[in-house]
Amino acid sequence: MTRIREAALACLGYLHKEEALLEEAIKQTEDLYDALNGRNWGCLSELFQRHAELGQKAGQLAIEREEIRKRLGSLLGVAPEHVTIGSFLPEVPADLQLALQSAKERLMQMCNELKEKNYRNGLVIHGALQVFNRMLMVMTGQSPSETYTRSGSVEAMDTRPLFEARG
């Protein structure tokens, strides 16, 4: 087996580990969405534990990624930080090119899916914080029509008062 073929197989094995990590991240993001929408508040503690474990796995994969990049960099004659799958593909035997390209495309799709789900969770959190902020303002007698951002600029509220206090 040639060194390029061995490196391609190692790279493919690594990409499969990345895919498994992203699958778990997507699952956790979906579970968080369910919890944020009140469907399963009890899972938050377990979810935080799973998230910590996922972070550890991601750290281990980052180390492995750097090792593979060093290996590929030495084979290609470039610095490890310049190694990409695209730069490696032309050197790979034809039977492995399709597998590497497919794995790369799957990872890109999964990253986009994760990004969309994280954005959706961010919207849920933002909406909940706005409602909470409005409730606090109404309860403390402040004007609920505007709030201030961390930078000090005025931010208009997106929701109407939840209740109206009449004296």
Image (cartoon, rainbow, N blue to C red):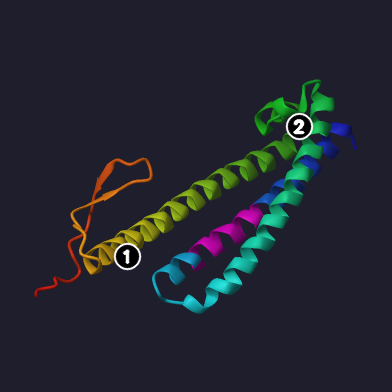
- Residue 44 horizontal/vertical position (percent): 53, 72
Tell me the residue at 58%/69% (across/down): 47
> Amino acid type of disc 2?
Val
66 sits to left or right of 123:
right
Horizontal relation, residue 29 to residue 96: left or right: left
Q: Going by the picture, which residue comes out furthest to the left?
A: 167
The type of residue carrying mark 1 is: Phe
Magenta stretch: residue 28 in it? yes
Label annotation for residue 109? none
Q: Hey, which residue is sitting farthest right in the picture?
A: 1
Magenta span contains residue 48: no
Q: Main secondary structure of the magenta part?
A: helix
Q: Which residues are magenta?
A: 19-31
Which of marks 2 and 1 precedes in the sequence?
A: 2
Residue to which mark 1 is pinned: 132
- What distance separates the C-alpha of mark 1 from that of mark 2? 55 Å
Q: Residues within 10 Å of mark 1 (few under 14, many from 20)?
A: few
Mark 1 or 2, closer to the camera: 1
Side of 111 relative to 73 (left or right): left
Is residue 34 depicted above or below 158 in this figure?
Answer: below
Q: Which residue is mark 2?
A: 92
Q: Secondary structure at mark 2?
A: loop
Which image quarter holds the C terminus?
bottom left
**Which of the two residues, 30 or 146, is positioned nearer the viewer here?**
146
Q: Which element is circle 1 on?
A: helix
Query: Would you place residue 22 above or below residue 102 in this image?
Result: below
Q: Depth check: give the residue in front, 36 or 70.
A: 36
